[in-house]
Image (tube, rainbow, N blue to C red):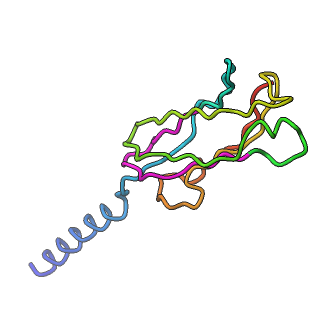
């Protein structure tokens, strides 16, 4: 009887431990989607940030950085920081950032830039590898 109880206790601990080690805490996962340049009377960099995780995110920032270089079209994008609000799972936040109007900044110019969400990793996420993306769009 003692051996049976010991085996039962071990089995219960094994099941409890395996459930503990395989369960994963719900986490947010912020990513950048649908980036494009919209040419109207004013040129816009349009994109959205989505929470594709399974938990609410906290508010964070997104950095827009032109790629370094001597190409004059890189002056079309102004380095900026944008606030990203708290996003529920599945929620999308749309952003529209005006592009500079200067010589060479027309709808045919290829713009090279990087978008970084939560660049200091303040938010624990399911995936930290989809927080920044480099783009070359237009042209």
Q: Based on the picture, tell me whether residue 71 belongs to the magenta stretch.
A: no
114, 14: nearer the viewer: 114
Q: Position of residue 15 (x, y in %)?
A: 26, 64
3 vs 81, nearest the viewer: 81
Residue 90 image-quadrant placement: top left
* Furthest residue in direction bottom, as rendered: 2
Observer able to see residue 80 = yes
Q: Nearer the viewer, residue 131 or 1?
A: 131
The residue sitting at 73% across, 34% down in the picture is 100
The structure residue drawn at horizontal position 47% and vertical position 36%, both measured from the top left corner, is: 93
Q: Which range is magenta?
A: 47-65
Above or below for 31 versus 13 = above
Report how many numbered discs are placed on residues in the image. Answer: 0
* In this rendering, position of residue 103 left or right of residue 66: right
Q: Is residue 13 left or right of residue 132?
A: left
Residue 111, above or below 38: below
Which residue reaches farthest right? 70
Left or right of residue 138, residue 46 in this image: left
- Looking at the picture, does residue 114 appear above or below residue 98? below
Q: Residue most toward the left?
A: 1
Q: Position of residue 88 (x, y in %)?
A: 37, 42
Residue in the image at 34% along x and 57% along y: 23
- Locate the N terminus and report the quarter of the image it occupies: bottom left
Q: Quadrant of the C terminus?
A: top right
At x 54%, y 51%, the residue is 61
Q: Horizontal and vertical percent for residue 46?
A: 61, 30
Q: Is residue 131 visible?
A: no
| Closer to the camera in the image, 17 or 100 | 100
Q: Residue 95: which quarter of the image?
A: top right
């Amino acid at each position: 009887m003692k051996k049976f109880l010991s085996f039962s206790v071990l089995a219960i601990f094994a099941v409890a431990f395996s459930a503990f080690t395989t369960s994963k805490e719900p986490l947010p996962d912020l990513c950048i989607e649908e980036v494009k340049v919209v040419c109207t009377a004013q040129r816009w960099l349009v994109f959205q940030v989505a929470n594709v995780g399974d938990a609410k995110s906290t508010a964070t920032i997104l950095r827009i950085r032109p790629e370094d270089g001597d190409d004059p079209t890189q002056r079309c994008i102004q380095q900026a920081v944008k606030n990203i609000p708290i996003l529920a799972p599945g929620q999308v936040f749309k952003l529209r950032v005006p592009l500079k109007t200067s010589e060479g900044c027309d709808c045919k110019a290829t713009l090279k830039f990087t978008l970084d969400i939560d660049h200091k990793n303040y938010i624990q996420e399911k995936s930290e590898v989809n927080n920044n993306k480099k783009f070359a769009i237009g042209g």
